[in-house]
Image (cartoon, rainbow, N blue to C red):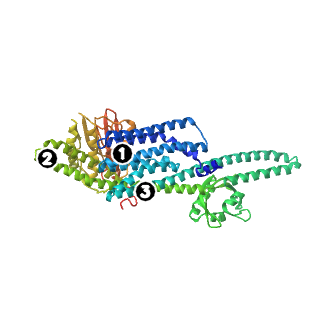
Amino acid sequence: MASADMHDREPYLAGRVRLIYSDAPATVAINLLNAAVLSFVMRGELPSPILLGWFTFIASVMMLRIALYAWHRRAGGYDEIEARAWLLRLAVLTTLTGIGWGVGCLVVMSEAPPLHKVFTAFVLGGMAAGGLPSLARVFVTYLLFVIPVLGPAVLYFAWQGGEIGWSMAVMGTVLLAFLLMTGKRQERVVLEAVRLAGENRGLVANLIEETEKALEAKGRAEDLNEDLRNEIADRERVEERLRDREKALANAQRIARLGSWEWDIVNDRIVSSEENNRLFGRDMNATAYDYDTILNIVHAEDRERVDAVIRDAIAQCKPYSCDYRIILPDGSEKVIFEQADIACDSAGRANCITGTNLDITERYEVEQELLAAKFQAEEANAAKSQFLANMSHELRTPLNAVIGYSEILKEDVEERGQSDLAPDLERINIAGRHLLQLINEVLDLSRVEAGRTEFHLEEIDLTVLISEVAATVRPLVEVNGNRLILDIPTKPGRMRADATKLKQILFNLLANAAKFTDEGEIHFGMSRFHDDARTGGKEWIRFYVADSGIGIARDSLESVFVAFERTETGRDSKYGGTGLGLAICRHYSEMMGGAISVDSKPGEGSRFTVRLPVQAVDCRPARVAGAGE
């Protein structure tokens, strides 16, 4: 009895636990990567023993999780009772992981500077959200992870007090509540999906079994019909067996919620099975039901579509299928999936239709819930973009102050003859400007995703624009001993586009080429061409930037335009960057009705090509509702 109660509280537990264990390698990799990144960022702000001890704890727990994952794989299949033991082992390690992150990051934030605290808070938020898809399949597992992760940080910020502290505490609490609600909702969705999958498998198996029985019965009936011509005495036995089979078929239809019917088109008479009568809430054999009467049962919004499908099938004498809503006598609705085959006479005219109706109301409701969940996810993504935009604005203000004060202090120490302090101030200034550039890139990308990018189309003199871009980038190109070679027509002409965004596209491509090329050549060129097949006009402009640098592997060509994605070489600390520049180039190119592409080979260099219409148009997608509020 106790095991039955547990099964009721945790339905389909074994299947959901196996799903969580299957994500273990990825979960371990993400935890170790994030722990390594946080330790690297905090290396100059905290004592090494603290960082090493924390990282060792996280790594130890991850090794235990890998060992548990290997043990789980060797164990093979298990039932619902054994699944509770596997869930308990997983819950212990998950809780230790959450405690490690929550308490460890609390120690980090108590000792770190403000910017590092914010970074740590972002890491905690990412870890809490990242565990949702996997652990929420069994909600209690996610609960034991996310509360230790976010709880200490919320308490810490509340203890700090002040405007920032209370704001961060409230934001953390809201995030925790949102994640818990989302996790609970996801657990329900997973349970419903598992339940429906099991029911569908059972229905299909029953339907196949009953169909086979019906076919066997039909074969035996045909044999008996032949015998009936000679042996009238066997008629009662055969009829009894046929009634039994019909009862079995009716029972199979009831189990599968599958009704059958036949429409005599010539006489406009519909004969319906018992299960079909139940589905429609009417005894269609007791009353003369014709086609128009049945059509009036269909929901008014679906009626015209269903009528068109059936009439087209009759005209072409071919099978059809469609789904539609019906109105029951009590005013409620059901969703029906109908399939039918059409019999035709020798002249090719339809004279009879035989079909089935399946009640798919529950499946339809689940699909609607999934669509609603998809819409909520899209809204959450828009909110993320808006949050990044707002945070980037908030970070730029103090960062500009840091840059400004570092310049003032540098001038002061030089005037006072304390030149030995100037290099440190110069490093602060350089680091601040680099960070400001990264924040600006994040701000640009978040504006694009939130639909808040400003867009100004204007007439551009390409001679002036190309000269400005070349003059700006030439010093950067020459830093690594490269030569900038221009392949520009004598009279490049004019075009209509957003000058600021076009400059940013070209500068990003040239700056990338300069960064990944040493003692080589960087070619910057443009040309005009015609293409009637493209939208946006017949006349186009092609800009290209080619270098003789390190190149890009073939399997990384698609990912270079994805935000925050970098190739293996691009992750080298020698080159730096966030992986946003090319993503911004792609967004801006598409906003003006164009496109960007890359062709590259490792060790031979890369060639980036931007194609834009001479008369650019605003091709931005419709702004996300609420994104600019």
Residue flagged by tag 2: what amino acid is it?
A: Val
Label 3 to label 2: alpha-carbon separation: 51 Å
Q: Which residue in the protein does label 2 denote? A: 413
Residue flagged by tag 1: what amino acid is it?
A: Phe
Q: Residue at x 38, y 36 (%)?
A: 554
Circle 3 crowding by C-alpha within 10 Å: few under 14, some 14–19, many from 20: some
Q: Considering only vertical position in the picture, is 250 above or below 579? A: below
472 or 366: nearer the viewer: 366
- For residue 386, say whether it is visible: no
Q: Which residue is drawn at 61% across and 42% down?
A: 79
Circle 2 crowding by C-alpha within 10 Å: few under 14, some 14–19, many from 20: some
Q: Which residue in the protein does label 1 denote? A: 564
For label 3, the SS is: helix
Residue 49 lies left or right of residue 279; in this view the side is left
For label 2, the SS is: helix
Q: In the rendering, at what x and y percent does residue 131 appear?
A: 46, 47
Label 1 to label 2: alpha-carbon separation: 39 Å
- For residue 337, say whether it is visible: yes
Q: Sequence order check: which comes first, mark 3 or mark 1?
A: 3
Q: Which residue in the protein does label 3 denote? A: 379
Residue flagged by tag 3: what amino acid is it?
A: Glu
Label 3 to label 1: alpha-carbon separation: 21 Å
Q: In the rendering, at what x and y percent does residue 144 appear?
A: 48, 49
Q: Sequence order check: which comes first, mark 1 or mark 2?
A: 2
